[in-house]
Image (spheres, helix red, strand yellow):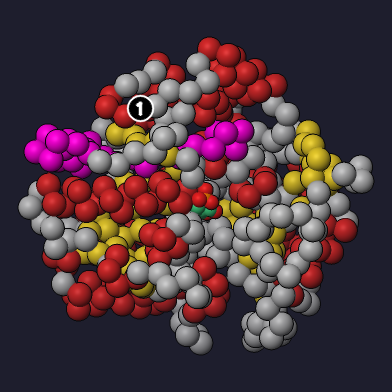
């Protein structure tokens, strides 16, 4: 055993796999075994491994300017170019971009921006955030508090109450619908619950509602049709902002450019981006807000003397250069269109698993999917043993496929966006 405290790991586990190198959609371990990447690293290596353009971009940027900070308005061209490109791409009005290092810190930044913003417009009591059960928003103190998965909470003493985190239903029809309840009835029921929560807490205390358009780590939950339209109608009624956590779903993952567009979410007020922003060649995140919020924050920073938030690596020039090149490649090479087509192919191929006696549901959209394993196919009863997903994941790995067990007994797939139909066949065959 090494000295590493492994992240998100049962620390009794010994080291399980030593990955040595990657090439395209494949990785190789230290024994020379080859694996096809069914999860794009951790939902992030969209352009695969050993992309020469990204490597050259990073190398060139490191030689020119390996580091510069952005405090006090000090800047560099590549950071400005990246912010401009992102502002053009996101489905938001007059977007402004704050750079960080990870999805978790992007969400922390947003919590602080919300508070700064509502203070600026004279509504300091409007600070609570509604997050959903079975959501994943990261693991820092604030983002873990937004996360709706109990294993990320237990024994960490998270400050849910002082942060003002409120919890509402997961839009998970397969698991949470009542017997004989239609999808439309299910949506109406959980959106009514949301409205009741808002009214009982007081709309004047609630700043935002955060959602992953399609969840990832909690089992790839694709909400039923009409859900987001109804949610947005309620939020608009009570003047509550829509915060899209697109850390997984942005940049072609779900069959269009952004998860918001795939799911019919109209102009989110805030968006969190990371992972595929740089195809994971460098750590970088972006907390994006609409222009109207920025104007109020700007005004307040003059009164306070500073917008007192920033990381040493906010706008790291190498990360910005790599992210900018990643976005250029996406647009130049039609990566989103390719992913839409190959994603449809993947979803159609995965349908075959619906016949399997241990599969309760196959779900997904575009290039993200999950297969939920159940003890009883007819009733959907889950396995008692919460590690069933891990056993199945290990079996896939023994077959040369990397995937991930999520929410106990689902197997998630999220291949690099560049995979071919033949590689989808290989993933399905190995699974
Ligand atoms: N938000 C979502 C939707 C995620 O899926 C993740 C990570 O998987 C995060 C936030 C946290 O990102 P990071 O692990 O980069 O902190």
Q: Residue furthest front?
A: 3
Q: Quadrant of the C terminus?
A: bottom right
- The number of discs equals 1
Q: Residue 229 location in percent, x, y?
A: 33, 58
State the residue in front, 55 or 263.
55
Residues packed near mark 1 inside 10 Å, few (<14), some (14 to 19) or many (20 plus) = some
For mark 1, give the secondary structure.
loop
Q: Position of residue 26 (x, y in %)?
A: 79, 40
Q: Is residue 357 above or below residue 412?
A: below
Residue under the point 21% across and 64% down: 206
Give the magenta-colored segment's residue range.
278-307
Q: Nearer the viewer, residue 426 or 121?
A: 121
Q: Is residue 178 left or right of residue 279?
A: left
Tell me the residue that label 1 is attached to: 70
Q: Is residue 376 left or right of residue 113?
A: right
Q: Residue furthest top?
A: 64
Residue 78 inside the magenta-drawn segment? no
């Amino acid at each position: 055993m090494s000295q590493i405290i492994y992240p998100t790991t049962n620390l009794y586990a010994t080291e399980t796999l030593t990955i040595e190198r990657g090439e395209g959609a494949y990785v190789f371990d230290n024994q020379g075994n080859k694996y096809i990447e069914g999860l794009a690293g951790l939902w992030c290596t969209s352009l695969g491994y050993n992309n020469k353009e990204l490597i050259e971009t990073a190398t060139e940027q490191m030689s020119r300017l390996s580091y510069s900070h952005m405090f006090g308005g000090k800047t560099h061209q590549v950071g400005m170019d990246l912010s401009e490109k992102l502002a053009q791409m996101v489905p938001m009005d007059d977007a402004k971009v704050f750079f960080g290092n990870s999805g978790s810190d992007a969400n922390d930044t947003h919590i602080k921006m919300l508070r700064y913003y509502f203070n600026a417009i004279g509504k300091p009591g409007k600070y609570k955030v509604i997050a959903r059960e079975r959501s994943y928003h990261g693991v820092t103190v604030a983002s873990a508090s937004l996360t709706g998965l109990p294993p990320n909470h237990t024994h960490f003493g998270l400050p849910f109450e002082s942060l003002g985190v409120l919890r509402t239903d997961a839009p998970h029809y397969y698991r949470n619908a009542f017997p004989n309840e239609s999808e439309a009835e299910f949506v109406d029921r959980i959106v009514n619950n949301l409205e009741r929560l808002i009214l009982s807490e007081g709309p004047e205390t609630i700043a935002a509602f955060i959602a992953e358009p399609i969840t990832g780590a909690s089992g790839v939950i694709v909400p039923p049709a009409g859900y987001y339209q109804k949610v947005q109608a309620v939020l608009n009624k009570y003047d509550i902002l829509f915060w899209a956590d697109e850390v997984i779903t942005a940049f072609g993952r779900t069959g269009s450019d952004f998860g918001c567009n795939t799911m019919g979410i109209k102009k989110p007020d805030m968006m969190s981006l990371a992972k595929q922003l740089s195809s994971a060649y460098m750590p970088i995140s972006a907390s994006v807000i609409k222009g109207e919020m920025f104007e109020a924050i700007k005004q307040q920073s003059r009164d306070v003397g500073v917008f007192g938030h920033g990381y040493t690596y906010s706008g790291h020039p190498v990360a910005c250069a790599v992210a900018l090149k990643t976005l250029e490649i996406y647009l130049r090479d039609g990566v989103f269109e390719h992913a839409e087509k190959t994603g449809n192919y993947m979803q159609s191929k995965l349908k075959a698993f619906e016949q399997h006696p241990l599969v309760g549901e196959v779900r997904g959209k575009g290039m993200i999917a999950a297969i939920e394993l159940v003890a009883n196919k007819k009733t959907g009863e889950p396995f008692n043993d919460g590690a069933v997903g891990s056993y199945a994941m290990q079996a896939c790995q023994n077959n040369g496929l990397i995937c991930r067990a999520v929410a106990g007994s689902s197997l998630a797939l999220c291949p690099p966006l560049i995979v071919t139909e033949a590689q989808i066949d290989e993933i399905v065959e190995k699974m």
